[in-house]
Amino acid sequence: MIMAQAVEGVPPVTGGDDLAALLSPGLRALTWPDGSTGMVEGDVVVVASKVVAKAERRLVAARTREELEQVIAGQTVRVVAERVRPDGSTLRIVENPQGLVLAAAGVDTSDVPLGTALLLPEDPDASARALRRGLDARLGVRPGVVVTDTVGRPWREGVTDIAIGAAGIRTLQDHRGRRDGYGRELRMTVIAAADEIAAAAELVKGKADGRPVAVVRGLGHLVTREDGEGARVLARRSEDDLFREGSAEAYARGLADGRG
Amino acid sequence: MIMAQAVEGVPPVTGGDDLAALLSPGLRALTWPDGSTGMVEGDVVVVASKVVAKAERRLVAARTREELEQVIAGQTVRVVAERVRPDGSTLRIVENPQGLVLAAAGVDTSDVPLGTALLLPEDPDASARALRRGLDARLGVRPGVVVTDTVGRPWREGVTDIAIGAAGIRTLQDHRGRRDGYGRELRMTVIAAADEIAAAAELVKGKADGRPVAVVRGLGHLVTREDGEGARVLARRSEDDLFREGSAEAYARGLADGRG
């Protein structure tokens, strides 16, 4: 059994805020269907990267489309694929410094003051660890922490939340060695558990209604005493990826090479 | 608040079984943290495609690697990308007749008798609708139904569950027109809600321990009276996809064209 609920009453977050301090009242006030309140060991706190980034002063000026393009370029390690939209702007899917493949490098222009843009946290795993420490100190429980972002995906319509930072979570749940009912080793063996937690939390968080934090209960088997390796291990190395480059980009490179 | 739990006591499923009949006792026996039992309107039943396919007699002979390759070829509309594995076998990511992009066309050789392979349901949305009707008739509530499969993804390590069939679910949750706190239209506007439900359910289902069904409570706003358009709308048309073809495949095609 898992339960997930949004945390109510999270105030607007601004640069320099102590997230653990801001979230603690709402976490203490949680009420659960069995009548219990607050947090227990094994709970997972899931936080939208947006509020983490705001607290970490990742808001930058972007007054014009050109300035915004420069901001995105500064967060771009490698352009993966591009497409010009009907309105003339360019959708650019890039790899960012954390190895995440994201539209516009995850730079966010919604729910931020006009003329600004919000970068992703510089090290979301470190952000998750810091929040975990802060919550432990204030609440006396050490929850798992997942920092999420909302992304599009090849082959699938619609966006989902994924884990871009984590602390105290088995981000990859390894079933290798377990066997099926016929004694054969399981094929689908490593579950991206932190991404599934992010997705489950999205179902109760709000996109635009000021509920950027949720708590998931019932996943104690995925919560670890140590902070662990974080969400970084969920980002596949581009060398290992069959889709490291957009189809049109790869074709164009081949065409140019073929023409010599 | 959402709650999700696996359904206990689902017996092994074989060809011709009535899934609604098999699942009903376990669904009636559910107990919830608030003390309630069974199912209520607005609940979502999430079923692994494996048991749906078994009930629908989708088990076929595949005695040798060659026969298995032929089975997969029969489920392949288009090869998207290939890679030879260290053991000499080939990982082949293909588009299947439902427009899903999947390794081995979703043909499953785990947890099936030796010498056989399991195809995906022929029309998973129809499977979901049929199960919904059957559950309505037996339980007197008409839940949403999601049929899941486990898939790998570009750019991300680990597998997750996605929705390949659905009935009575807003598979895509459209926030277009909603505005952020600054009055601008939301950018990430269409949520792949059915995929997030599949992911949440995976956290409580078991891979190898005979718990292929879960119920998610608390998503009544996503459950519809009509069966709706199903999960088919989650599969992006390949013409619209920037990653319709593997990077190496696209490059090779460009190279050949360039050489004329």
Image: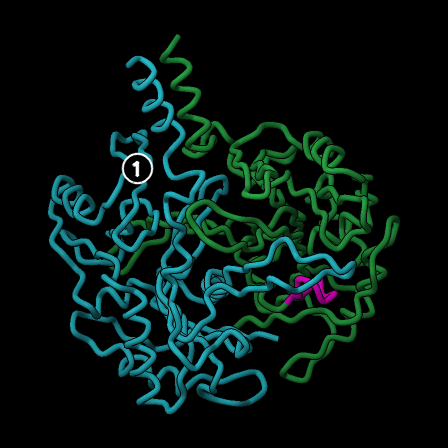
Chain colours: A cyan, B green
The image quarter in which residue A78 lies:
top left
Image quarter (top left, top right, bottom left or bottom right) of the C terminus of chain A? top left
Q: Which residues are magenta?
A: B205-214
Residue sitting nearer the eye, B22 or B75: B75
Tell me what residue is drawn at x 22 percent, y 56 percent: A119
**SS class, disc 1:** strand
Residue extending farthest to the front is B87
Tell me what residue is drawn at x 43 percent, y 30 percent: B248
Disc 1 target residue? A91
What chain does mark 1 sit on? A
Task: Please determine whether, in this image, residue A128 is positioned above or below residue B162.
Answer: below
Whether the magenta-drawn stretch holds residue B67 is answered as: no
* Amino acid type, label 1: Leu
Task: Please determine whether, in this image, residue A137 is positioned above or below residue B111.
Answer: below
Task: Please determine whether, in this image, residue B260 is positioned above or below residue B38.
Answer: above
Drawn side of residue A75 relative to residue B12, left or right? left
Residue sitting nearer the eye, B158 or B221: B158
